[in-house]
Amino acid sequence: QVQLVESGGGLVQAGDSLRLSCATSGLTISNWAVAWFRQAPGKEREYVAGFSRSGSNTYYSNSVKGRFTISKDSKNTVYLQMNSLKPEDTAVYYCAADRSVITSHIMVPSQYDYWGQGTQVTVSS
């Protein structure tokens, strides 16, 4: 049974940093696509960052490139280091995983079968 559990969200000020964690079970992140998405109130869920299925490639949305870094460890946990946070980064952040998503669709939420419950990130100005 695949489970994804996010943690690390909170309330911070603009310019601060946060690190989100996604603890996974029931899968091996070395051969699954694992990604972070976010959803702000009234907006669609959007891709933030993620790994390809092989784990050898990383992808970032233009809005976070250079500020956020995705990483993983040997315990099947995926992290999202968020630096220089902005108020527009405020959202619920979700971890997602799928074993068959292809590169051309890697930023599409509907391509991911498994999701965590989300963790709230609020950035005040």
Image: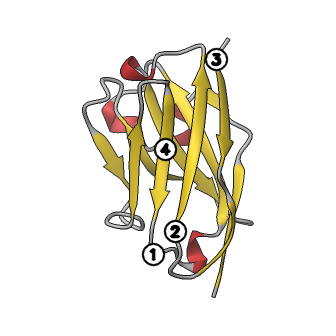
What residue do we see at 73% from left, 66% from top? 42
CA distance for labels 2 and 3: 29 Å
Query: Regarding mark 2 in the picture, which secondary structure is present there?
Result: loop
At label 4, the amino acid type is: Tyr
**Image quadrant occupied by the C terminus:** bottom right
Q: Sequence order check: which comes first, mark 2 or mark 4?
A: 2
Residue highlighted by disc 1: 84
Q: Where residue 23 sits: x, y (%)?
A: 60, 32
Image position of 52 with respect to 66: above or below: above
Amino acid at the residue labelled 2:
Ser
Pointer 2 or 3: first along the chain: 3
Q: Alpha-carbon neighbours of circle 4 within 10 Å: few (<14), some, or many (≥20)?
A: many
* Among the two numbered marks 1 and 4 on one chain, the one whose residue lies closer to the N terminus: 4
Element class at badge 3: loop
Whole-angstrom CA distance, mark 2 to mark 1, is: 6 Å
How far separated are the C-alphas under marks 3 and 1? 32 Å
Residue found farthest to the left:
56
**Left or right: where 41 falls relative to 55:** right
Say whether marks 2 and 4 touch (CB < 8 Å): no
Please give left or right for residue 40 compared with residue 97 in the image: right
Depth-wise, is mark 3 or mark 1 nearer the camera?
1
- Please say if 116 is above or below 85: above
State yes or no: discs 2 and 1 in contact (Cβ < 8 Å): yes
Mark 1 and mark 4: Cα distance apart in space: 16 Å
Question: Residue placed at 44% from the left, 23% from the top?
Answer: 29
The image position of residue 76, as x and y in percent, is: 49, 25
**Dot 4: element:** strand
According to the image, label 3 marks what residue? 2
Residue occupying the point 32% across, 29% down: 55
Residue underneath mark 4: 79
